Image (cartoon, rainbow, N blue to C red):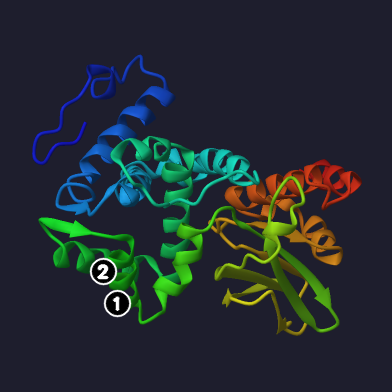
Amino acid sequence: MENLGAITFRETALLVDQRTGTHAELERVADVVAHENAHMWFGDLVTMSWWNGLWLNEAFATFMEMLAVDDWKPEWKRWESFSVARAAAFSVDGLVSTRPIEYPVRAPKDADAMFDILTYEKGASVLRMLEQHIGPTVFRDGVRQYLRTHAYGNADTKDLWTSLGAVAHQPVPELMDGWIFQPGFPLVTAEVQGSQLRLSQQRFTYLSQESTTQQLWQIPIQIRFSIRGRTEHHKLLLTERETSIDLPAGVTSIFVNEGGHGFYRVRHQGVLLQQLLDQGLKRLAVIERFALVSDAWATTIAGMTPLPEYLRLTHHL
């Protein structure tokens, strides 16, 4: 439990025998220690104005535990294993009955429901997505400005976005509000139309609901083009229902959501999936392979992707 300058602990969350402890035990202790230390800044140095901002404490501490442990023990590949926890957040957030990360809280007891996978894992995931979009250095500098500005005081979600936006020189509040204040997450469909790549978005749900069709997000998308033995990288912010970009000449394969850190599912349609299969899925990073297969499985369950297409994908793993 974090207290300003005085963290209390259970021995099982601090002490571990490195000779006999399992990897899971070592990892858990490292995660907990990093998480609770992060609360010295996110929670104690700067405290949320009210309980609706609980995610500012917990999602940031979860994000920082991954960042710190990955830097300390890169061989543990902590971001790769975090993908499994993020997949659980996808499962919950794909329900029509899901909730936004932040919602109005009238009394402290109303915040009890916030101590869940959406606050911790989804919250940390959208922070990681933003960090990858604006760049780790800019993100770090924006967080430093936020902490300096509100040190020993209170802050709201908009205060964090304002600091990050000021340093990044980007409209971060407009970008992130949809991820924090509306439920669910988007499905991005990618398909080739002539000499262009068409990207479109809709809310992903396991059950079709008319009420969800109007939702839009500002989606940071990173794309990798493979072009005859070399690669090109492209970033864009999908703010409309759909958009199209010109394809580079000689492109042999396209992967949408490069790095696999975007908190959205991607449906690579037709020739795009076949190109990825032809080049060999083992050429993708581990997180990218995990995202590709889990996205295909989820869209198959939701009736958006034919089962044979999913079986064809998993056969090539």
State the image coordinates of residue 178 (x, y, percent, origin top left): 50, 64
Q: Which residue is mark 1?
A: 167
* SS under mark 2: helix
Q: Indicate which disc, 1 or 2, sits on the residue closer to the N terminus.
A: 2
Q: From what the image shows, is residue 16 above or below residue 79? A: above
Residue located 45% across and 58% down the image: 180
Q: Residue furthest front?
A: 106
- Label disc, if present, on residue 141 of the rendered structure: 2
Q: Residue furthest top?
A: 20
Residue 235 visible in the picture? no
State the image coordinates of residue 116 (x, y, percent, origin top left): 44, 37
State the image coordinates of residue 156 (x, y, percent, origin top left): 28, 60
Q: Do tag 1 and tag 2 residues touch (Cβ < 8 Å)? A: yes
Q: How many marks?
A: 2
In terms of image quadrants, where is residue 297? Answer: top right
Which quarter shows the N terminus? Answer: top left
Q: From what the image shows, is residue 258 above or below residue 225? A: above
Residue located 81% across and 84% down the image: 195
Q: Give the CA distance from mark 1 to mark 2.
A: 7 Å
Residue located 43% across and 50% down the image: 123
Q: Is residue 308 left or right of residue 59?
A: right
State the image coordinates of residue 162 (x, y, percent, origin top left): 31, 72
* SS under mark 1: helix
Q: What's under tag 1, amino acid-wise?
A: Val
Q: Residue furthest right?
A: 308
Which quarter shows the C terminus? Answer: top right
Residue 286 visible in the picture? yes
Q: What's under tag 2, amino acid-wise?
A: Asp
In terms of image quadrants, where is residue 15? Answer: top left
